[in-house]
Amino acid sequence: LIRIDTSNPPGDETRVAEHMLRWFRERGLEGEIVGEPAERAGFVLRVDSGRPGPSLLLLAHEDVVPANAPDWRVPPFSGLIEGDYVWGRGALDIKNLVAAHAVATARVAAAGGPAAGALVYACTADEEEGSVGGARWLVDNRPDLVHTDYVINEGGGHFLERGGRRIYFLESGEKGTAQFRLIVKGETGHASVPLRNGNAVVAAARVVEALAAHEAPLVVDASSEDLVRTLVDAPRLRERLRDPRTARAALAELARRDVQVADMIEPLYGFAFSPTIVRSNSVAVNVFPTRVEVSVDCRMLAGHDEQEVLTEVRTALDGVEADWDLEWIGPVTPGNSSPYPSRFSEVIAATLKRHVPDAELAVRHSVGFTDSNWFRAAFPDTIAYNFAPHIVEGYDEVTPRIHNVDERIHVRDLAFQALFVERVAQGLLS
């Protein structure tokens, strides 16, 4: 799978779908290639028990972010197995689950299928760039294939070791996404005569600085409270973190004690604005541009919408000397969550304890975005959790490698992910 380069853009994920069709067919199982456009399709397969019962979807995406080969120790699309690791782009995000879920599905089918209900396998396109032809297309156009009672997907399953505890994070929800460009306007002219005012680059720098410095109002909700309760032992600090009036100062204190825990909690308090790309329309180095685009990735809590994003941007840039407009990059996607606890989380916890007796399961919301969002939004009766546990390497080792150079997964973690989801399916579909 890693050797099939599905860097997005352009994706070309149909090659993965065709590979999975052949792989399952060799094992006596027949699925369906679905999606639009034709070169960006996914694959869905259903193993039905023929008996009443719940249904579980094993979900993963086929595409990966691009890789700059000269920066890597090994070719990023080699799929090299070396030093107890599988190396390559997608080894952690998320071709490991495309593979692990496939193995689990095939093993359940080989054992006679689920005891009750149905097990569904799906790998989808375009998760890294908006899911237009992937999960979003599936829930809109083929709900008959993917509307299930439960969904398990990427995102959680990393463990953190603190004070002799091994804490695994199950993600029951995620923040919303609003991506936009700030168009900063200026005057053109020859750069040999500096502009007193009207330099769009200088104005854009002010905009970036103001956004980076902006402190949006803190919101304390269940997602941050659950994490504070799990990870912060000091009672007084814990209470201050649960009060919006004192949370900012308390975060600074927490960062001095444990910066990693502080970094996990802080994004759950509300808006996060991250300027990521700056481009000008200058035609030469000695010509002032009339337009500078600042691309911004914004994450927001469930319940916030694009009007609130716009209000917060205006507040952040109030008084900044710049002539700017805002244009959206794609649709604004609200955050959402699934109920917790549930029978699904109980099966996950029991399965985890079976293999990792000292494991503690903690709930959190993802600060990123996964395809689970589309399933929760389209099917309110579906419970979607993000959980793909590691057993060898923890949060400290795994998360820095995602979307990074030298991405790799320990072979025992990969094998455990397949075994784990197989046993979750057996426990849930009974």
Image (cartoon, grey):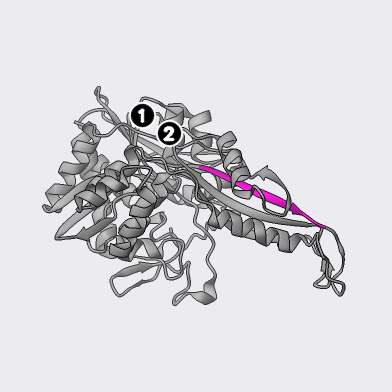
Direction from residue 293 to residue 21 in the image, left or right: left
What is the C-alpha distance between the residues marked 1 and 2? 7 Å
Q: Which residue is mark 1?
A: 382
Of residues 101 and 32, the one nearer the viewer is 101
**Among the two numbered marks 1 and 2 on one chain, the one whose residue lies closer to the N terminus:** 2
Give residue 108's position: percent from left, percent from top.
Answer: 24, 41
Residue type, mark 1 in image: Thr
Residue 128 at what x, y percent from top left? 51, 50
In this rendering, is residue 344 above or below 84? above
Vertical placement of 346 versus 127: above or below? Answer: above
Q: Does 267 lie within the magenta span? A: no
* Residue 179 lies in the magenta-colored region: yes
Dividing the picture into quadrants, the one containing residue 399 is bottom left
Question: Percent x, y for residue 388?
Answer: 30, 50
The 10 Å Cα crowd at callout 1, few under 14, some 14 to 19, many 20 or more, is: many
Mark drawn on residue 339: none
Look at 70% across and 55% down and name the residue there.
293
Give yes or no for contact between labels 1 and 2 (Cβ–Cβ under 8 Å): yes
Stretch in magenta: 177-186
Is residue 168 visible in the rendered image? The answer is no
Disc 1 element:
loop
| Residue marked by disc 2 | 375
- Identity of the residue drawn at 20% across and 53% down: 234
x and y percentages locating residue 407 in the rendered image = 41, 66
Q: Amino acid at mark 2?
A: Phe
The quadrant where residue 38 appears? top right
Tell me which secondary structure the magenta stretch mostly adopts: strand
